[in-house]
Image: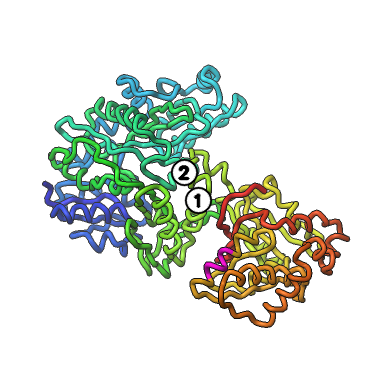
Amino acid sequence: MFKKVLIANRGEIALRVIRACRELGVQTVAVYSEADRESLHVRFADDDVCIGPAPARDSYLKIPRLIAAAEITGADAIHPGYGFLAENAEFAEIVTASNIAFIGPTVQQIRVMGDKAAARKAMTAVGVPIIPGTPGPVEDVEEALEFAQKIGFPVIIKAAAGGGGKGMRVAKDADEFERSFSLARSEALSAFGSGDVYVEKYLRRPRHIEFQIMGDKFGNVIHLGERDCSVQRRHQKLIEESPSPAMTPDLRKRMGDAAVAGAKAIDYVGAGTIEMLLDEDGSFFFMEMNTRIQVEHPVTEMITGIDLVKEQIRVAAGERLSVLEMPPLRGHVIECRVNAEDPNRNFQPSPGRIVTFHPPGGNGVRLDTHVYAGYTVPPYYDSMIAKVICQGRDRPEALAKMQLALETFIIEGPTTTIPFLARVMQNPRFQSGDVDTKFLEREPELMREPIPTESPDDAVTRSKHLERGAYRLAGERRMLKMEGFDLGNSPLEHTREAVEGKTVILTTTNGTRALLAVQGARDVVVASYVNLTAVSAMLRSALRGGADISLVCAGQDRQFALEDAACAGRYVHLVSRRLATLELNDAALAATLIDRKYGDNLMRLFNTAAHGRALAAAGFADDLTTCAAVNSFPVVPIYQDRQITKLGPERER
């Protein structure tokens, strides 16, 4: 076994390797840039070395400095983690030539699998299914177009080197192809130093399934089951789970056998993943192999009970695999990656100081993170700051645990993707397992939520921080759409075509004034006749839990409005009739009386109320009909942090 391991990485993966080494009785060396001086991996390692300024090119990617740090501290092995130099064959070669063990596969294995064209050739040789594509890189656009027309559009142009979504472009037809080809080559050259690209058939609704591979130096290669990584944005994984909702025992055997055959073809040593695309008809195709530990390795660790990082270190030290077949799967595991990004600004990175940090907990909940209260998220590196992993007896229990974990995970300071992840967990299609790599493209409202504002000027100011074309300004003055705004406040204007995938910034409505007046309350829900049953159920549950409830009527120009009072009275009636004792103030009692007089005929109520008459006279009679459709929208909008999110089943607008 090694005596001292240098971790050529940072953040949570550096901490993860340090923990594994501690359990094995191995000392560790942390390397850090000037920006990471206060990082936890520096604090918990046995030794540490500063390797340069903040930018990765001047520190974590400087091979000579890493080798010097290992030699100065007496490290006899280097663990590359993931990212940075983890799949760099030149780095592995220099490490080995310096008489330091590289904890990973051999140089040749990294080289073969790091070249997409060479990897496809190696897989084809052992019968692993390959997506139809060019046998190698193509330089001539005319030759590439001819091939694309032969296999049929759509096609995807991919960088031959690298990954992570860079150097990838989809061409839907011949008209798009030349531009997509040029962009893919340019991105590949910029990201990986090589403009080589190849062309392959593009599957419309595939799942991204990867198999965890482990191999040793004695010829043993096994797989430890699959992870479904289909929920992605721009080819970046956001949520992973195991087992895949689409998996059957027969399919797992066929895909697993293919993955092992592919790894054995190159005598693979260490931890790696065979990544595949699973089509709707059950056919599957090799995509690439990652020759390193994966970000999402905790999913496999929890579902199999095997510590992959310790196994990786043991194998590199010359030991045999501790298991030679896949153990029984233990329930269901889901992982969410938490990034310091703002989904409402096109996932723009959000570095900064963490003011409050309250981690989730409970049985079956794991948190891998390197951040803490007082830590400053730097702007120089990947924005992932935590991984939440939840295990349940089955998928519904794992989902319930993840929902609670995200609800109780509090990070104040930088904007994070926690609210976005919570919305995905509540999405009916995700809950049913109906996902593929285009899931977020078909569910764009998960990416955007309405923002109430205090005034038209405030709305315009907030829109300046959003990407052009990513928002809609909505507001009226005296029932007329405001000049320069995209929408008024009529629900009939807010169609799916008008708002899908956009942030809607609302202003000048009585409702937004009411929301802003109650901001700071522990829980704020938005109620009307259209979601009567859903909100009433939530209110009854809150009352049984000992909460106090205040009903705030929006009114009209800060004055009493008959229709709002009647609606409040209906809620009081529905909530109180199932509870033995309930104290009502005079306003609540008065509201119930108004409901008794008008509540049995909402159109009569709206035509009696002054604002209802004004709307009808202005040509908005259809809006009144929409508002009178009781329980037409079975959702509970939640107002928090100056944004509106919703709970409940999906609906069609």
For residue 64, side relative to residue 550 (left or right):
left
Give the residue at x 69% y 67%.
Answer: 511
Quadrant of residue 329 within the rendered picture: top left
Give the residue at x 76% y 64%.
Answer: 600
Q: Amino acid at mark 2?
A: Val
Q: CA distance from mark 1 to mark 2?
A: 9 Å
Q: Position of residue 410 (x, y in %)?
A: 43, 65
Q: Amino acid at mark 1?
A: Val
Q: Position of residue 617 (x, y in %)?
A: 88, 60
Magenta-colored span? 537-542
Q: From this viewpoint, is residue 293 visible? A: yes
Q: Which residue is mark 2?
A: 231
**Which labelled disc corresponds to residue 167?**
none
Of residue 314 and residue 549, the one placed in the foreground of this image is 549
Q: Are marks 1 and 2 in contact (CB under 8 Å)?
A: yes
Question: Does the magenta-highlighted stretch encompass residue 541?
Answer: yes
**Residue situated furthest right in the rendering:** 617
Q: Does 408 appear above or below 491?
A: below
**For the residue carrying disc 1, how many other residues have a C-alpha within 10 Å: few (<14), some (14-19), or many (20+)?**
many
Q: Secondary structure at mark 2?
A: strand
Quadrant of residue 339 within the rendered picture: bottom left
Closer mark to the observer between disc 1 and disc 2: 1
Q: Which residue is mark 1?
A: 424
Question: Does the magenta-highlighted stretch encompass residue 309?
Answer: no
**Overall secondary structure of the magenta section:** helix
Q: From this viewpoint, is residue 92 visible? A: no
Give the residue at x 36% y 53%.
Answer: 389
Q: Secondary structure at mark 1?
A: helix
